[in-house]
Structures are given as structure tokens and as C-alpha cells.
Image: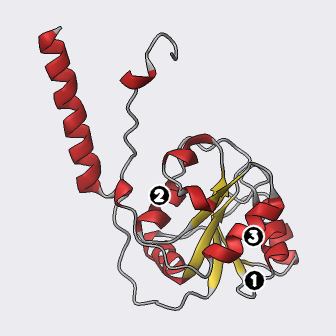
Amino acid sequence: MTIGIKNEQIHIIPPFVHDLPATSVQNKDRILFVGRLTRAKGVHAAVAAWKKSGLTLPLVFAGTGSERNALERAGFEVTGWLDRSELAEQYARAATIVMPSYWQEPYGIVGLEAASLGISVVTWKSGGTLEWSEAENTVEWGDIDALAERLKKAATESPTPQSLVNPSNVMAELLTLYQDVIHEHNEG
């Protein structure tokens, strides 16, 4: 029971993501980190895992933040802030997304966007990412070795888009929930 509410009364319905602009890019030529470039978002964990993985694909950072200069000095490509079409191109080029946030993500829109496009997201078992991430792509929080191993596997697999974040599916789930609540209220 959470704050007086029974667990069976709690329903989590993910936010859906809006379609990104279409892109003709098909070459999966990078591992991608999308987000605020800070320690809290796990940029150092991403770098450490990428190095340990032995992957030859470059690790590319899309975003801005306090760690940007350090990443550029270390030789990483940092795209900076991207508009929706530029972000769509980066996603299209990603073999996988790495999202090792030390901050407990409430949900993680980046992961939802990537999953909707059929891109694997490798992340910690923490926060809201547990609501949408694939079990095989989550590793224990802070385990760089496991993150590196999973990153290497995910970069060579062919995932399929997750229906979880499809607007039609989310709206159908929301409608069903409202109908159940109305039905329970009318009976109660």
C-alpha cells in the first residue's frame, strides 16, 4: 500500500511521444547519448562503459551542459542542442542509446522516443525507466562493467519499435482506465 492506496489501484500510463520527422539516414554509425551533459545524467558512466565495451562505433553526445567542454577536449563529438529534425537524424544513426542517469529519471522521454523508433536503450534499473525499458537492456545501478557488456550486445541487435509509446495505444489504455473508474464509481 502506498500513501493509503492499494497497489492494484495504481495504474501507470506512459506519456506518448510525438513522431519525429522522417529521415533518410539508415547508417547505424554511432552510440548515442541524448540529454543534459552533466554528471547527474551519467555522461561519465557512458564514457566509461563505452571504453570498456571495446565498441569501434563512436560515442556521440547530443545536448549541452557543464561537461560539454571536457567531452570535446577528450575527443568526443558533441552536437549541442538539436531541433526535432536534427535529433531525428541522430536517432536514425544510432545503433543504440546509452542512458545511465544517476538522477532518478521520472520517466525519461529520450528513452521513450528511442524505443518508439526501435532503438535499444541501455540504462540503469532505476527511477521511471523501469516502466518502459526492456529488461535485457537494464543493468544494476552503477555497474559499469554490466553497462559496457549490455551496450556491446545492444549495438549489434535488431530491436523492434515498442508499441508502449504509440499514441493510439496510450489513448486506448487511458480510455479503458477511465471507463473502469466510471464503472466502479457507478457500482460503488
Q: Is residue 37 above or below residue 180?
A: below
- What is the distance, in whole Å, between disc 1 and disc 3 at their CAs? 10 Å
The quadrant the C terminus occupies is top left
In the picture, the disc for residue 176 is none
Q: Which residue in the protein does label 1 denote?
A: 55
Q: Is residue 139 above or below residue 90?
A: above
The residue mark sitting in front, 2 or 3, is: 3
The residue mark sitting in front, 1 or 2, is: 1
In the picture, the disc for residue 112 is 2
Q: Secondary structure at mark 2?
A: helix
| Dot 1 or dot 2, earlier in sequence | 1
Task: Kindly indicate whether the residue at mark 3 contacts the one at mark 1 (C-beta within 8 angstroms).
Answer: no
Whole-percent x and y of residue 131? 50, 45
| Dot 2 or dot 3, earlier in sequence | 2
Given the image, on which type of amino acid does mark 1 rest?
A: Leu
Q: Which residue is painted at 59% across and 74% down in the image?
A: 96
- What is the distance, in whole Å, between disc 2 and disc 3 at their CAs? 22 Å
Q: Which residue in the protein does label 3 denote?
A: 149
Whole-percent x and y of residue 161? 40, 69
Q: Which residue is painted at 34% across and 60% down in the image?
A: 163
38 left or right of 31? Answer: right
Q: Nearer the viewer, residue 142 or 33?
A: 142
- What is the distance, in whole Å, between disc 1 and disc 2 at their CAs? 24 Å
Q: Is residue 7 above or below residue 172?
A: above
147 left or right of 87? Answer: right
